[in-house]
Image: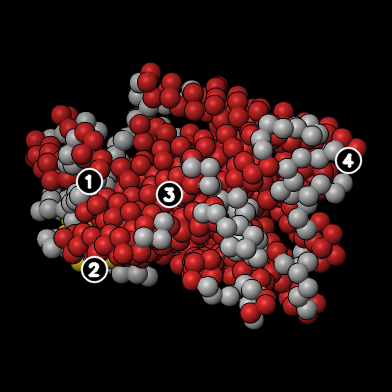
Amino acid sequence: MAVDVLPPRTRQRVERLDAIWEERPGLLGWLTTVDHKRIGLLYFFTTLAFFLAGGVEALLIRTQLARPNERVLSPDTYNQVMTMHGVTMIFLFVIPMGVSAFGNYLVPLMIGARDMAFPRMNALSYWLFLGSGCFIYAGLFMRKGANCGWFCYAPLNTKSYDPGLNVDFYALGLIFNGLSTTAGAINFIVTIFKLRAPGMSLNRMPLFVFANLASSLAIIFLLPPLTMDLTFLELQRRAGFHFFDVAHGGDPLLWQHLFWLFGHPEVYLIVLPAFGIATSIIPTFSRRKMVAFPLVALAELLVAFIGFGVWAHHMFATGLPTVSLVFFAAASMMVVIPSTIQIFAWTITVISGRPIFAAPLLFIGGFITFFVFGGLSGIMFAAIPFDQATTDTYFVVAHFHFIIFGAAVFPLLGGMYYWFPKVTGRMYNEPLAKVSFWVTFTGTALTFFPMHILGLLGMTRRVYTYPASAGWGGYNLSETFGAYILAAGLLLIAGNLVWSFLRAVPAGPDPFYGGTLEWATTSPPPEYNFAVIPTVTSPYPNWDREDREEDARRLERGQLVLAAGHETPASTVRDGYWDEILDMPSESPWPITLAFAVLLMFMMVLLTHFVTAAIFGGVALLALAAWHSKEPQEF
């Protein structure tokens, strides 16, 4: 509602909130912001830039493999491009886009909070993420990019086999990136448990928030093994340790155990935000609440939990004892159960509702299709002989991309359309959105399905070129053709959203009649999100018209406006009872300063200037001290 049509007292309260929460305009405001919505947008556009880079790398790979004996890229450049494609899409796009970009913008809105629990740490996590991405890509621009595959197996990652800085950019860059991801995950966990609007007990949390909680809990446990693995690698490369050196009592399989203890739960971390987006879009366009709501919430948490018991699923061909393989094969089958619960809940909700097949729901339909196909091939890998026969073939690449792109990225694309009116206040072009879906769907299927056949024909992953006699040319050409169709579909999506933003057709606060709280405020939301702390009595509070009317009456009375400062309520962890009022910190230059000091420290470590690195570490500590020198203190 526009401020000028509000009653005088109500308008005064809203104007006071505007004055209290208003951030600096211009570039300086974006550099010092702690507003979760601005940080979400910073994550969004940064990850899109990395997505563009990863997409260009994918097209270079597919162009190189389009015909036998192609020479588009040199072997060393191909190794760097292929590795950077995997690192980019996983660490710099899919995870930060789903967890950090969508999560930062939407989680506080969905739980009725005014910001994240640690606003300045939230800003720090973004600047660390940006710094880590720039650090990793600096290697590629110096022609010393990571060249060992995205899982960079030992002993090929050791100094003896790769003496340049390529692997060091990979190892130090991912340690750097892990700092950002861990800080963000801690922030989400505390925010979800403590900053929910009074009345939002755990059983009333939106399913999107459950998915984000599951992702954040998984991050806390899956990143330490990777960080330990990367630290061991750097100690071996630079300090003469022998963690992966058999001749000195080490074991190359240690790398695989630690990496996949991160790597397989990370696959579920990638798809959990997709689950959350699906459970937001499906009820809205099906015009009914999600079927089996408690089971779906539990299934999202179980996917993250069971995923930690499946890491050796990737190591069936390494000579592990058969009794161990049987355990991991069983765990690989068990993880299907919570995923299947969600698939049935999604489809039954659509079938039993009154579905409107707008573009966001079409993308969720594409997601379910690819998720089912990718899941079926995943179950095949639980069969130990089949897994051993197809290990490191394009059959694995096909399965992985059906899950990573088809199942993880399609909901992100649908979510971009779904929340575009909320973020911009403008509507997208629906006919063009539907066209973009079908082009993207066709390109995805044509790119990744033939890889199954190539894998069964014996084409190995990470292959640079192949002879014409192998008989792989036709399938590879169709994949390359599909990759360019897919790129055209993604460009259609980008063009639609840019054009829709520029043509300025108002969307209103709730164009889709969504059920969660982000639709209960203006589009785009104000800096403080809600003029009055929302009333919550169900998992779909925006469909509770009486509660929204009560919010309006509270605003008129000045009840729960919290306009004495940067205030937001805290509630109890389980039942969401009113706990206390928190005074949140405002904009600050220290997060970006600290992140820049950490970036310089990692650069000096890379160049083995350890004294200079220690100096920049000291600068980081000084920035941290200055950060905490002024009130108010964060929660």
Q: Tell me if residue 562 can be seen.
A: yes
In the displayed structure image, the side of residue 517 where residue 302 appears, left or right: right
First in sequence: mark 2 or mark 3? 3
Residue 470: assigned label: 4
Q: Nearer the viewer, mark 1 or mark 2?
A: 1
First in sequence: mark 1 or mark 3? 1
Q: Nearer the viewer, mark 1 or mark 3?
A: 3
Question: Which residue shows up at 76% across the image and 69% down it?
Answer: 318
The CA distance from mark 2 to mark 3 is: 42 Å
Q: Position of residue 240 (x, y in %)?
A: 53, 73
Query: Quick one: label 3, few (<14), some, or many (20+) residues within 10 Å?
Result: many
First in sequence: mark 4 or mark 2? 4
In the displayed structure image, the side of residue 56 where residue 446 appears, left or right: right
First in sequence: mark 1 or mark 2? 1
Question: Observer-nearest residue: 31 or 510?
Answer: 31
Residue 135: assigned label: 3
In the displayed structure image, the side of residue 200 where residue 144 appears, left or right: right
Q: Position of residue 621 (x, y in %)?
A: 24, 64
Q: Position of residue 435 (x, y in %)?
A: 60, 24
Is mark 1 in CB contact (under 8 Å) with mark 2?
A: no
Query: Quick one: label 2, few (<14), some, or many (20+) residues within 10 Å?
Result: some
- Which residue type does callout 2 highlight? Asp
- Which residue type does callout 1 highlight? Thr
Q: Which residue is mark 1?
A: 32
- Kindly give the residue lying farthest to the right in the view shown: 469
- Which residue type does callout 4 highlight? Ala
Is mark 4 in CB contact (under 8 Å) with mark 2?
A: no
Circle 2: element type: strand
Question: Which residue shows up at 85% across the image and 65% down it?
Answer: 385
